[in-house]
Image (cartoon, rainbow, N blue to C red):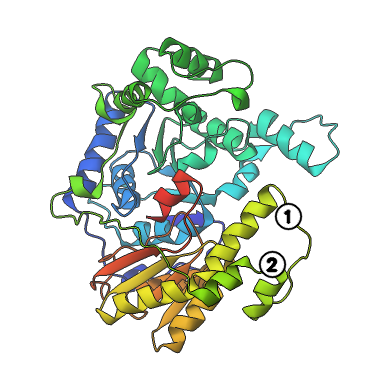
């Protein structure tokens, strides 16, 4: 098996790794993808919620396809997971090897050749021109877009390139537990929706016409000015098109839909501030940081987004002790705990506090290399760490039972709530 990637340093020796054995629901997803291919659909949307193993489901389907060349576009953090899945999944007898190219979204412009006569000067203008008017250097018959919600903006450079790559493919698998927050964010699925609704090209004009025909929102002018008010009728219409109708373009399942899979239990837990905490909360930003032993802190009064961000960071830092106590109780009950935070300072302080209580704790964040983050993740998944504190909000698998040694009961603590529904769903 040939694996062409942006970074070969995290590849393991397949001969020393345990084999991935698909579960029944992953085989069902494989069959659904292959059925879509068999009836001539241009692609498939795999929308299972996080933790159900979409990567293996998609790879099982790809293994059963006759094509040799495959392109996988995914976040950088998902590259190790794809490598492991490819290396650890047995290739059925009689199936040819696959040549797989794995590329993170930030590198997708490298797939394009620039226009021959360009007068653009700035880097941004050149990149925009490359994404809009460049030509593909190569064509892949099978394409996977992992975390496909990344390309929901039809004007973004990554979105423009990925749509060209998908348009040139024979079959495209889109993978996301959070395909979009509104119907208008699903234009990247236009080709699939066109097949399901009797359309032709699935381009933006046709997608706009489909939204008007379905009487969904207001789709006039430029895409960024389109508007939609959430309502149950539109949700039911889109749910039928995407997952539930006779001509649905994809499949979406929740943990509770899978036989034998534990249902996710959610519980809101507030943190009460004592008198010292309330005084600290009301302190100026500089005084607040000085009390916590942190450097810096502007004395200027923030406004707008800056004020909102400062409020969220202050609330995050001031609740560290409460979260540490809560996590400590879970760990004392022989659980493993993954803690999601939004700020690096929170991550460092919370990790230090838990480590000081005798627990084995690791961090996963943007300060560390991909290799270091993956080493921490594997240590947690194999039971060598009691807790992990992470800032990333997609393409991270911290679910129980993925690897030998990771059978302990597990809890996720979201220390910092996210403003984005997509981020919150991805964290879970």
Q: Residue furthest left?
A: 259
The residue tagged 2 is 285
Rendering quarter of residue 360? bottom left
Q: What numbered label is drawn on residue 290?
A: none
The x and y percentages for residue 269 are: 36, 62
Q: Residues within 10 Å of mark 1 (few under 14, many from 20)?
A: few
Q: In the displayed structure, would residue 320 be above or below residue 161?
A: below
Query: Looking at the image, how many numbered discs can be counted on the residues?
Result: 2
The residue tagged 1 is 302
Q: In the displayed structure, would residue 399 be above or below residue 363?
A: above
The x and y percentages for residue 174 are: 41, 38
Q: Residues within 10 Å of mark 2 (few under 14, many from 20)?
A: many
Q: Residue at x 70, y 74 (%)?
A: 287
The x and y percentages for residue 225 are: 61, 24
Q: Is residue 119 left or right of residue 355?
A: right
Q: Is residue 276 left or right of residue 22?
A: right
Disc 1 element:
loop
Q: Are marks 1 and 2 in contact (CB under 8 Å)?
A: no
Residue 247 visible in rendering: yes
The x and y percentages for residue 402 are: 28, 65
Q: Residue at x 45, y 85 (%)?
A: 355
Rendering quarter of residue 128? top right
Q: CA distance from mark 1 to mark 2?
A: 10 Å
Placement of the N terminus among the 4 image quadrants: bottom left
Residue nearest the observer in this picture, 378 or 80: 378
Residue 369 visible in rendering: no
Q: In the displayed structure, would residue 314 be above or below residue 37?
A: below
Q: In the displayed structure, would residue 405 be above or below residue 147?
A: below
Residue nearest the observer in this picture, 372 or 407: 407
Q: Residue at x 51, y 48 (%)?
A: 419
Rendering quarter of residue 266? bottom left
Residue nearest the observer in this picture, 348 or 315: 315
């Amino acid at each position: 098996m040939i694996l062409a990637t942006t970074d070969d340093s995290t590849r393991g020796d397949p001969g020393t790794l345990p084999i991935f054995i698909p579960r029944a629901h992953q085989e069902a997803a494989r069959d659904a993808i292959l059925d879509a291919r068999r009836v001539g659909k241009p692609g498939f949307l795999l929308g299972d919620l996080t933790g159900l193993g979409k990567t293996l489901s998609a790879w099982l389907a790809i293994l059963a396809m006759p094509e040799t060349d495959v392109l996988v576009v995914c976040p950088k953090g998902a590259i190790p997971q794809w490598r492991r899945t490819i290396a650890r999944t047995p290739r059925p007898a009689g199936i040819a090897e696959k040549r797989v190219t794995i590329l993170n979204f930030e590198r997708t412009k490298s797939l394009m050749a620039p226009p021959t006569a360009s007068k653009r000067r700035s880097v941004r203008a050149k990149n925009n021109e490359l994404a809009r008017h460049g030509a593909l250097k190569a064509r892949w018959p099978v394409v996977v877009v992992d975390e496909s919600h990344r390309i929901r903006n039809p004007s973004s450079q990554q979105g423009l390139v990925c749509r060209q790559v998908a348009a040139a493919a024979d079959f495209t698998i889109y993978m996301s537990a959070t395909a979009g927050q509104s119907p208008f964010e699903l234009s990247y699925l236009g080709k699939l929706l066109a097949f399901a609704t009797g359309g032709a090209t699935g381009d933006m004009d046709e997608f706009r016409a489909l939204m008007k025909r379905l009487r969904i929102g207001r789709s006039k002018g430029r895409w960024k000015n389109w508007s939609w008010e959430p309502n149950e009728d539109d949700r039911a219409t889109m749910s039928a098109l995407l997952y539930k109708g006779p001509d649905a373009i994809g499949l979406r399942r929740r943990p509770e839909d899978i036989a034998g899979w534990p249902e996710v239990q959610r519980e809101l837990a507030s943190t009460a501030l004592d008198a010292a905490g309330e005084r600290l909360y009301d302190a100026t930003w500089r005084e607040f940081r000085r009390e916590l032993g942190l450097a810096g802190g502007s004395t200027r009064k923030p406004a707008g987004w800056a004020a909102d961000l400062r409020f969220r960071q202050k609330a995050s830092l001031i609740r560290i002790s409460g979260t540490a106590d809560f996590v400590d109780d879970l760990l004392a009950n022989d659980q493993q705990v993954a803690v999601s935070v939004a700020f690096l300072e929170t991550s460092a302080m919370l990790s230090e506090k838990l480590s000081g209580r005798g627990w084995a704790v690791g961090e996963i964040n943007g300060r560390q290399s991909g290799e270091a983050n993956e080493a921490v993740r594997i240590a947690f998944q194999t039971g060598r760490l009691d807790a992990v504190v992470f800032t990333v909000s997609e393409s991270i698998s911290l679910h129980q039972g993925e690897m030998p040694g990771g059978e302990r009961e597990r809890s996720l603590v979201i220390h910092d709530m996210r403003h984005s529904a997509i981020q919150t769903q991805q964290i879970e």
